[in-house]
Amino acid sequence: MLNPVIGAHPTTYQKVGEIRNELIKNGYSPRWFIISQKRYRIFNKILDNSVPNSNHLKGKAIDLFVLDIDGDGQYDAKDFRLIQSAVLKCRQKNIGKKIKAFDYFGKGYLTQHMVDIEVLN
């Protein structure tokens, strides 16, 4: 019940995979791992950066811990812009599916490596 690393909707997994593939297609080597998917309300409440009606509650969001995208050995705003660009390309290919990426810059050293990917109809 409290495992936050399982249970996202299959479409959410698919869209994260499409974002990864778009980055690879453009010559990047995305290095990330999933740290949170579907959450139960009790777990969601104890997280500092979560909102009460989080899309994680419906399995429509995945949090990634990003190590690097552009190959320079660090994660920074440039890497996030590359993710956003890939999200926009995926959104254009998938009319009807709204895909968004959110960063956590300024929220602490470890938290700033997080990217929240959300998929809405």
Image (cartoon, rainbow, N blue to C red):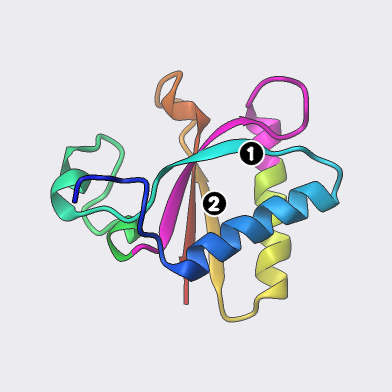
Residue 50: x, y in percent? 28, 44
Which of pointers 1 and 2 lies earlier in the amino acid sequence?
1
Residue 36 numbered mark, or none: none
Residue ID at (84%, 52%): 25
Q: Say which of 99 and 39 sits in front.
A: 39
* Highlighted range, magenta: 59-81
Instruction: Name the quadrant containing residue 81.
Output: top right
Residue 101 numbered mark, or none: 2
Residue 26: x, y in percent? 85, 49
Q: In this view, does 28 lie above or below 118?
A: above
Residue 48: x, y in percent? 25, 34
| Numbered disc 2: secondary structure | strand
Residue ID at (72%, 73%): 93
Residue most extreme to the left: 42
On screen, residue 32 versus residue 57, left or right, reads: right
Q: Is residue 95 above or below residue 77?
A: below
Which residue carries the number 1 mark? 80
Instruction: Name the quadrant containing residue 96.
Output: bottom right
Q: Check disc 1 and give the amino acid type.
A: Phe
Q: Is residue 65 above or below residue 6?
A: above
Residue most extreme to the bottom: 96
